Amino acid sequence: MKTAICDRFGIDFPLFAFSHCRDVVAAVTNAGGFGVLGGTAFTPERLEQELAWIDGEVKGKPYGVDIIVPAKFEGKGESLSTGQLVDRIPAEYRAYVTELLAAHDIPIDDEKRYGGSNLSGDTGEQLLDVALKHPIKMMANALGVPPAYMIEAGASSGVPVAALVGAKEHAIKQVAAGVDVIIAQGTEAGGHCGEVSTLVLVPEVLQALEETPGGGGIPVLAAGGIVTGRQMAACVAMGAAGAWTGSVWLTTEEAETAPYTVQKMLAASSRDTVRSTGRTGKPARQLVSDWTDAWGPDKQKTLPLPLQNMLVEPVLRRVDKLAAQGHPGAQALATYFVGQGVGLMNKVKPARDVVLEFIEDYVAAAERLGASLED
């Protein structure tokens, strides 16, 4: 079952699990995989608490941290305050959200209407400083080439830097920047993703790296819609070093996914997701809902990152609370990032069980492939 990346990261099985929930991260790492905490949503102080807790749970076993620092965003380099960014949200967008909520019988709570965005990139360096005080074994970034300070910190600390890409051209840029691990994420993925499917993207990236000076030895993790061991085995058969997963952990017992959203995910098919800019301003796959239906070129265009996120995230958190209380309008609006693999996610189970099922399914797939060669 082991690939070279297992030896590199000290893990038993090449399954990497991205989650915003520390319990999921610890459970996956303790089960022999590699948990990765999404750290961008935390303040530096809170991230310190989360990582200290993980350290105590995993007792030296490897884990990583993902800190998103977008390459492009509104106000980049201008040192703007949250208030100054909020001022850039046009009045017509504020009115549109108000009308959308009113149509679903949800009044606006003006006191908590807008907030800072964890996708503005302004706390990335502080979060990285906190992370490097802990025994992390990987730092990851998405939405472009990692900032120079991340590459430099990785080189000086000996902690590998991973980057998510949605096109082979992006992978080549990452190699030039000095990234150590490439995560080739297909359009099936939850969250921010491109337009190329995992089945096509992984071999494209592998071929591109082989043809790029210095790229041939860089491991590639496959991502996008992978929620079973057989899918993982297929990607390894194509040449991937392992799998990077996210959506499959959203319906585990440990996850902090909003309760009603979990119900939606368990009932969803693979066709019940859509790439929408309605949550962050960049295309991100999420559950179809009245919220995703309300945004788009033929409805209401979205604001750039992070303004769209600042406009809507506090509202969507309120929607989640109301949906859990049975509010029909909120339930119609409720959505969250999730990939097309959601159609295979139909039961709540412990994260450890998910890892074990991945291993069993992977082994069975490998045996089927082996048997086909013998025949």
Image: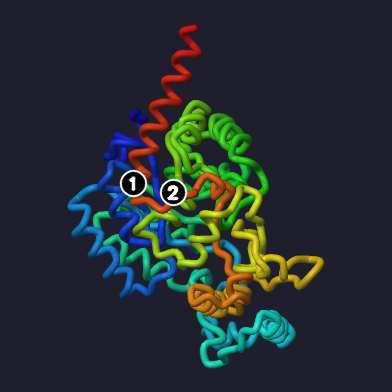
Quarter of the rendering occupied by the N terminus = top left
Residue 181, position as x, y percentages in the image = 44, 43
Outermost residue on the top side: it is 375
Drawn side of residue 327 relative to residue 178, left or right: right
Drawn side of residue 296 relative to residue 255, left or right: right
- Foreground residue among 348 and 155: 348
Residue with the mark numbered 1: 34
Q: Residue at x 37, y 62 (%)?
A: 21
- In the rendered view, tell whether residue 226 sits above or below residue 309: above
Residue 155, position as x, y percentages in the image = 35, 50
- Foreground residue among 171 and 176: 171
Q: Counting other residues with Cα less than 10 Å from the Cα at mark 2, is it few (<14), some (14-19), or many (20 or more)? A: many
Residue 276, position as x, y percentages in the image = 67, 61
Question: Dot 2: what SS?
Answer: strand
Residue with the mark numbered 2: 162
Q: Residue at x 35, y 42 (%)?
A: 355
Residue type marked 2: Ala
Q: Residue at x 45, y 26 (%)?
A: 365
Residue type marked 1: Phe
- In the rendered view, tell whether residue 51 sits above or below residue 78: above
Residue 49, position as x, y percentages in the image = 27, 70
- In the rendered view, tell whether residue 95 sits above or below residue 117: below
Question: Dot 1: what SS?
Answer: strand
